[in-house]
Amino acid sequence: MTWVPSCGVGSIVSCTVVDCAPHPGACTGFIPCTIAIVELDDGPWTYAWIEGQPPDRGAEPVRVRFAHEEPGERYPFFVRCAA
């Protein structure tokens, strides 16, 4: 797999809510997190976290954002597009 340019906008194909630990190693206090399959407008599909309340499947576009957890590392997540 390789990185390719993308506009970063897409729609949710499918999503589910899973319980996640708030930080690595935590064994209590799980919080609900949404993971989704996002179809990018450029064509590719990707799995990613959805921040906040996800829109209904395909009802509203989502846009990629990047979280920086460790120096030099980043991972994509998606948020609702501003109206």
Image (spheres, grey):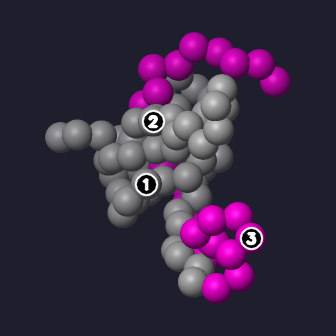
Give the residues in magenta.
1-28
Query: Closer to the observer: label 1 or label 3?
Result: 3
Left or right: residue 14 compared with residue 65: right
Residue 72 location, quadrant: top right
**What's the residue at 39%, 46% (across, down)?**
79
**Residue 32 in the image: above or below residue 15:** below
Helix, strand or loop under label 1: loop
Helix, strand or loop under label 3: loop
**What's the residue at 63%, 65% (across, down)?**
23
Residue on which the image places disc 3 = 25
Query: What percent of the width, then of the height, locates residue 50?
Result: 48, 53
* Circle 3: residue type: Gly
Left or right: residue 17 compared with residue 47: left
* Circle 2: residue type: Arg
Dot 2 or dot 1, earlier in sequence: 1
User: Which numbered dot is residue 51?
Assistant: 1
Q: Are marks 1 and 3 in contact (CB under 8 Å)?
A: no
What quarter of the picture does the C terminus occupy? top left
**What's the residue at 52%, 40% (across, down)?**
67
10 Å crowding of disc 3: few (<14), some (14-19), many (20+): few
Left or right: residue 63 compared with residue 31: left
Residue on which the image places disc 2 = 65
